[in-house]
Structures are given as structure tokens and as C-alpha cells.
Amino acid sequence: MLKLSFFSFYVTVHSTFGGNPLASAVAIASLEVIKEERLTE
């Protein structure tokens, strides 16, 4: 039982590279600021 619940926890967590909605929103907002402020020029 312990092994099953331990395995189930990690299966539902997924990876940090799996398209986390919050991280994606932060990345998009950061790119918009970089573009608007012309920080690459």
C-alpha cells in the first residue's frame, strides 16, 4: 500500500518541464516586458 501511494504521488506530479501554467504565464509576461522595454537593443 505504501509503495502504491508513493508511486501515485510522483505519477500525478509530472515533471517541472511539463508546461506548468504559472511558469508559462511568467515566461510570457517576461518576454513581453523585454520586447516593450526594448531591452535587447
Image (cartoon, rainbow, N blue to C red):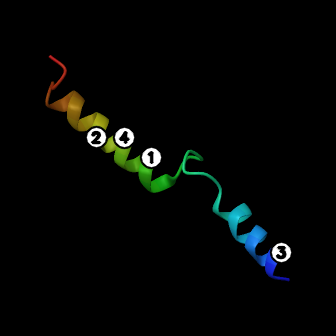
Whole-number angstrom distance, CA of label 4 to CA of label 2? 5 Å
Q: Viewer-nearest of labels 3 and 2?
A: 3
Where is residue 10, by image quadrant?
bottom right
Please state which amino acid type lies under the numbered disc 4.
Answer: Ile
- Between 40 and 9, which is closer to the camera in this rendering? 9
Question: Where is mark 4, residue-wise?
Answer: 28
Question: Where is mark 1, residue-wise?
Answer: 24
> Quick check: marks 3 and 1 in contact, CB under 8 Å?
no
Residue at 18%, 31% in the rendered image: 36
Please state which amino acid type lies under the numbered disc 1.
Answer: Ser
Secondary-structure class at tag 4 = helix
Please state which amino acid type lies under the numbered disc 3.
Answer: Leu
Whole-number angstrom distance, CA of label 2 to CA of label 1? 10 Å
Residue at 64%, 62% in the rendered image: 13
Left or right? Give the position of 23 relative to 39: right
> Quick check: marks 4 and 2 in contact, CB under 8 Å?
yes
- Give residue 14's mark: none
Among the two numbered marks 2 and 1 on one chain, the one whose residue lies closer to the N terminus: 1
| Figure check: 23 above or below 33 | below
Among the two numbered marks 3 and 2 on one chain, the one whose residue lies closer to the N terminus: 3
Question: Where is mark 2, residue-wise?
Answer: 30
Among the two numbered marks 3 and 1 on one chain, the one whose residue lies closer to the N terminus: 3
Whole-number angstrom distance, CA of label 1 to CA of label 4? 6 Å
Q: Quadrant of the C terminus?
A: top left
> Quick check: marks 1 and 4 in contact, CB under 8 Å?
yes
